[in-house]
Amino acid sequence: MLGAGLFPLVVAGCGAGGSEPASITSDQELLQEHGFADTDAHEIIDRLEALPVAERPQDLIASVTATSLQLQDNAERKAELPLPEDQFYLSVAPFIETSHECAFHSLTTCRGELRSRELTVSVVDSSSGEAFEEGPRTTHDNGFLGLWLPRGITAELTCTLEDYTGTASISTQAEDDLTCLTSLQLT
């Protein structure tokens, strides 16, 4: 499991199914104030990612690592909740002209170029050819597309927008695999 020692690195990141509701560490007051009491990491990630940018909490940093969701507010209260053992969260910001560097996705501060755009998305296992994701998906208001993928895979991710296409190799195998893919340029 990821220790609390990585928390400052994750918060500084991007501009900064079988889940377990128990937290690794948590400030219950922080979770309650943001409406996350008795909520697991999978649900919190999906809820925050789907919020319009204008409605995202300004006093909360929510970062996703390969193994946990880490929350911190302005009062320095922290909570860390484990991701499902069999799932990996990858947030992708395909772009045509502008992007930013990132390793661990910040649900509250990361912004991508292609906001609320319908793309065709394909995620195919590199060794077996199994398709984990295939079809139309719409990016969220923040320009990101969230993908819950199986752990332990290497795959090819392809995104298409009109006449623009981009492909990237992705991995969900290691604890330091990135959860924020901002290098997928569509050409």
Image (spheres, rainbow, N blue to C red):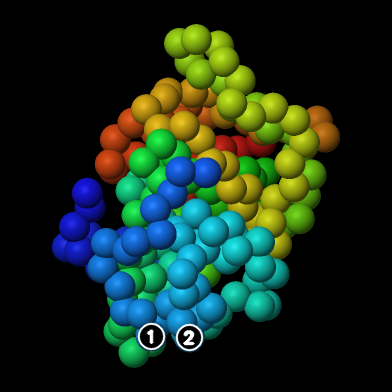
The image quadrant that residue 111 belongs to is bottom right
| Left or right placement of residue 49 versus residue 136 in this view | left
Label 2 with label 1: CB-CB less than 8 Å: yes
Q: Position of residue 34 (x, y in %)?
A: 51, 80
User: Which residue was labeled with disc 1?
Assistant: 29
For mark 2, give the secondary structure.
helix
At x 61%, y 52%, the residue is 144
Q: Position of residue 71 (x, y in %)?
A: 38, 70
The image quadrant that residue 186 belongs to is top right
* Residue type highlighted by circle 1: Glu
Does the image show residue 39? yes
At x 50%, y 10%, the residue is 128
Q: Position of residue 40 (x, y in %)?
A: 46, 60
At x 54%, y 59%, the residue is 43
- Could you tell me how many numbered marks the image carries? 2
In the orientation shown, which residue stands out farthest toward the right? 162
- Residue toward you, 99 or 50: 50
Does the image show residue 104? no
